[in-house]
Image: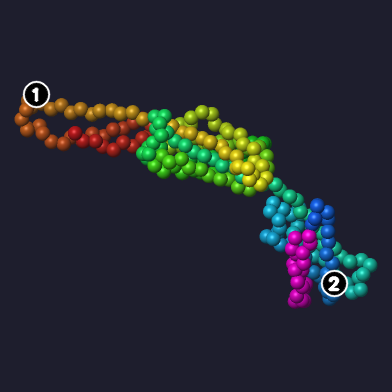
Amino acid sequence: YTFSITGTKGQTVSDVTVTITNGASNEVQVDNLIPDDYTVKEDVSKNPAGMTLSGSGEQTVTVTANNTTSIPTAEFTNDKTAVGSLKITKKVTLNGATTTTTEVDGTYSFEILDKNGAVAGTATVTITNGVSNEATVKNLKVGTYTVNEVTTSNPLGVSLVGTNGVSVEVTENDTAGVPTAEFTNNKEVGSLKVKKNVLVNGEATTSTLADGTYTFSITGTKGQTVSDVTV
């Protein structure tokens, strides 16, 4: 653990380090300081992974001359926060089958809930040309999480296959494999035909009098966009 020491009179003090072994507290003494108020600050950017400060990371001590019997001490405590990761895998199908079309493309959103139901993180997975994709959520405290797909933001007509809310167990230094929550979405589609009949003076004809291109718009009730078609 690395600490900077700064006085009020412009004096330069080299950074000091304190090494912890087997969890035993340790200390370092800095001598030959001129009397002054000194600010001691822990450089948390150099701390071991997952170590966070409990309390302030900056303290002020007053150094007096010949203080050998009562040396002021800046005391710091760190707490180890064990963290890990999880993956979210998204697969899509069209009418229950794999697809390379863009019909099920879009961005799918997820919430990661801790054991108390609080949102511990969010993620999105983007599907392009029907190809499966994944996202990794890092720096989660070790524990059990529930991954929920936010289905209200899914592309139109896409539904979740199976149940929502996948439970995963996040472990520290998960070198054996990052736990994965897997989701599959499906889009059901169908077809319609537009048939054009023509008459001339109310009767069937083989002439060219009614020949031409006829344009039709197609509108659904759910806001879907369908391009005009011609016959």
Q: Is residue 67 left or right of residue 47?
A: right
Measuring from the top left, give residue 126's x and y in whole percent: 46, 44
Q: Secondary structure at mark 2?
A: loop
Q: Secondary structure at mark 1?
A: loop
Q: Residue furthest right?
A: 69
Q: Which quadrant would the C terminus be assigned to in this image?
A: top left
Q: Is residue 89 left or right of residue 79?
A: left
Read off the magenta span: 1-19
When asked about the image quadrant of residue 73, the answer is: bottom right
Q: Is residue 37 left or right of residue 123?
A: right
Measuring from the top left, give residue 107's x and y in whole percent: 46, 42
CA gap between label 1 and label 2 equals: 110 Å
Q: Which residue is mark 2?
A: 31
From the viewer's side, name the closer residue of 82 and 158.
82
> Which residue is at a point 66% across and 47% down the rendered structure image?
173
The reply to whether discs 1 and 2 touch (Cβ–Cβ < 8 Å) is: no
Is residue 230 at least partly visible in the picture? Answer: yes
> Which residue is at a point 68% across and 60% down the rendered structure image?
45
Please, what is the three-letter code of the amino acid marked with disc 2?
A: Asp
Is residue 111 at least partly visible in the picture? Answer: no
Measuring from the top left, give residue 188's x and y in whole percent: 39, 29
Q: Which mark is residue 204?
A: 1
226 is higher (above) or lower (below) than 44: above
> Which residue is at a point 92% across and 66% down the rendered structure image?
70
**Magenta stretch: dominant SS?**
strand
Query: Around disc 2, counting alpha carbons within 10 Å, would you say few (fewer than 14), some (14 to 19), or many (20 or more)?
Result: few
When asked about the image quadrant of residue 137, the answer is: top right
Nearest to viewer (mark 1 / mark 2)? 2
Measuring from the top left, give residue 26's x and y in whole percent: 83, 59
Q: Which quadrant would the N terminus be assigned to in this image?
A: bottom right
141 is higher (above) or lower (below) than 116: below
